[in-house]
Image (cartoon, grey):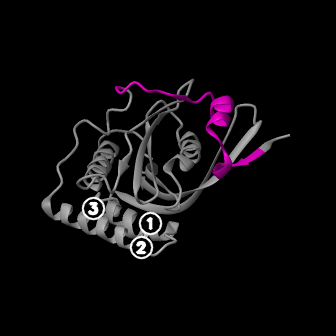
Amino acid sequence: MVQAIQAKDITLLELETNFGLQLIEDEQFFREWQDNLPEITDVEKQQLNRVKASYSNLLKYPPLLENTVKMVVLSPLLDLAGFYLSPFHIKSEKSVQISTEDEGVIVKGNIDVLVLFKQLAVVVIESKQAVFSVEVGKPQLLSYLLAISHSDKPVYGLITNGGSFLFVKLIKQETPKYGLSRLFYIFNPGNELYSVLTIFKRLGKLATEVDCRVV
């Protein structure tokens, strides 16, 4: 009998046990969030400063729910990264699922934001309620990346609750492997939204230059 598990309920242990998923801690595995990052303009920095101020203000009036996080934080970032323009286009709340080879386990769930390029996934954002740590969304996002990946080319993801941001890279080979960026926090000194935007732009450029999938 097939065991169905909602992606929102999957655990890292279940992903490791059922799919052989491995965390790679070698910093050379995931260099895309550090190397060859583009510059952002002073105008873009001003806009990101406004996003940070808006988010800070909204925190004074809880609860800050998922749709508000999308509207106030994610939407401006996607816009500045160029993901609303050709050749990118967005489809939201797309359902995906993964299963083991013997069909023993099925993991189901909804992707919050999906940006497509030439029918390939470009960027998927897994947006969580602001009260939850991004760790809560990690197993869910990894299950989506496993579902979307069909080759040895990398896929990428982002988990955010509006205040914290974590990028993920996954390569689905015989043994699927994933790596993590450092955690970006909106209230660290300066404005770490600058870094988040440069990484978005870098991944977008990779998607348009090479035949890869960026989630």
Residue behind mark 3: 80
Above or below, 39 relative to 76: above
Residue behind mark 1: 70
Q: Residue furthest bottom?
A: 61
Badge 3 marks a residue whose secondary structure is: helix
Q: Are marks 2 and 1 in contact (CB under 8 Å)?
A: no
Horizontal and vertical percent position of residue 129: 53, 62
Range of residues picked out in magenta: 4-28
Please check the rendered image and state whether residue 54 is part of the magenta-colored stretch, yes or no. no
Of callouts 2 and 1, the N-terminal one: 2
- CA gap between label 3 and label 1 equals 14 Å
Q: Examine the image and state in which quarter residue 33 appears.
A: top left
Disc marking residue 56: none
Foreground tag (3 vs 1)? 1
Quick check: 13 left or right of 119? right
Label 1 crowd (10 A; few <14 / some 14-19 / many >=20): many
Horizontal and vertical percent position of residue 14: 68, 36
Of callouts 3 and 1, the N-terminal one: 1
Amino acid on which the number 1 mark rests in the picture: Lys
Label 3 crowd (10 A; few <14 / some 14-19 / many >=20): some
Quick check: 141 left or right of 1? left
The residue lying toward the viewer, choosing from 182 and 95, is: 182
- CA gap between label 3 and label 2 equals 26 Å
